[in-house]
Amino acid sequence: MVATETTIIDPRVHDLGGFSVRRALPHLRARHIGPFVFFDHLGPAQFAPGQGMDVRPHPHIGLATVTYLFAGAIEHRDNLGNVQTIRPGDVNWMTAGRGIAHSERTPVVERAAGQHVHGLQTWVALPSEAEEVTPSFHHHPAASLPQIDPNGVRLRLIAGDAFGERSPVETFSTMFYLAAEFPAASVLILPPEHIERAVYATDAALLIDGVELAAGHLAVLPPGGKVEIRAAAAAHAVLFGGDPLDGERHVWWNFVSSSRERIERAKADWVAERFAPVPGETEFIPLPER
């Protein structure tokens, strides 16, 4: 989507059983921003001792999932045999390509103690020529990601290119994804280096070129100019976007593809159990009825 003026999106809230997520993408006013086709803000949620997150094994095709946490821990398992706990500031990048299955659960130690969880999960659509690449998973510790401090605003470059820096996370298209910490009374000027851009206010209101962006809302920015982001109070936000997609994408459940027929084949493969199982898991999420 290329906006001609700043568009404010109020995400839908989904209850996932014990915690809620705010889903900013896809939305009627913005199906995608750059290659980002899905944006979920998880929590903040507090789990009591003995409780936790249990996302049973489920499949993906045609995308890369990007998990980033502000608080807490999540254990990732996939059918390639990867087991990885992600903690605040780290990046888990999973390329589904032609097909992968994974689970996401609260680790044993954190489940026993109880924990506070707060984070983001986004999906990045793969370019059409890369939709069927070999599945893979990569973990990047927080210390490996570039830190940028323009005008006192602390930025962590999760993926892509921004402000003259490049993240070590391997991507398939031109994009940027930044976590930002704004001190009180700070200002960040976002340059026009990417065509499609958006800002999500995580926990406090911001002013985007004078337009108020409430906490938990998404601002889709117009292309081609610098954008002033101002924080009256201390605030966290994420900035993301990139080049427009090379064509429309179909999104059904956890599947993303430029082809409706490919999604139908993925649905049939999951029902027929042609996805390899996730080691250490015995449960799975059935195909939705609609």
Image (cartoon, rainbow, N blue to C red):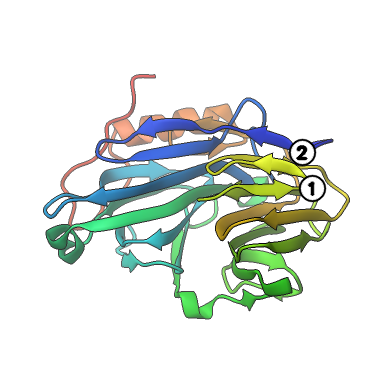
Q: Label 1 belongs to which residue?
A: 209
Picture layout, residue 71 above or below residue 14:
below
Q: Is residue 29 above or below residue 164?
A: above
Task: List x then y, in percent, for residue 47.
Answer: 22, 50
Q: Between residues 203 and 192, which one lies in front from this camera angle?
A: 203
Kindly indicate the quadrant of the structure image that contains residue 113.
bottom left
> As displayed, is residue 204 above or below residue 109?
above
Find the distance from the CA under tag 1 to the CA under tag 2: 9 Å
Please, what is the three-letter code of the amino acid marked with disc 1?
Answer: Asp
The residue identified by callout 2 is: 6
SS class of the residue under badge 1? loop
Q: Where is residue 149, by image quadrant? A: bottom right
User: In percent of the image, x 15 and y 47: which residue is there?
Assistant: 282
- Residue shown at 32%/29% (left/top)? 287
Q: Earlier in the sequence, mark 1 or mark 2?
A: 2
Amino acid of disc 2: Thr
Q: Is residue 80 left or right of residue 213?
A: left
Q: How many marks?
A: 2
Q: Residue at x 56, y 61 (%)?
A: 234
Residue 60 pos. (x, y %): 43, 44
Q: Which residue is found at the position 47% from the left and 27% from the top?
A: 264
Taking the image as shown, residue 250 lies to the left or right of residue 88, namely: right
Near mark 1 (Cα within 10 A), the count class, few <14, some 14-19 or many ≥20, is: some
The N terminus, quarter of image: top right
Q: Where is the C terminus found, in terms of image quarters?
A: top left
Q: Are marks 1 and 2 in contact (CB under 8 Å)?
A: yes
Q: Position of residue 280 (x, y in %)?
A: 17, 57
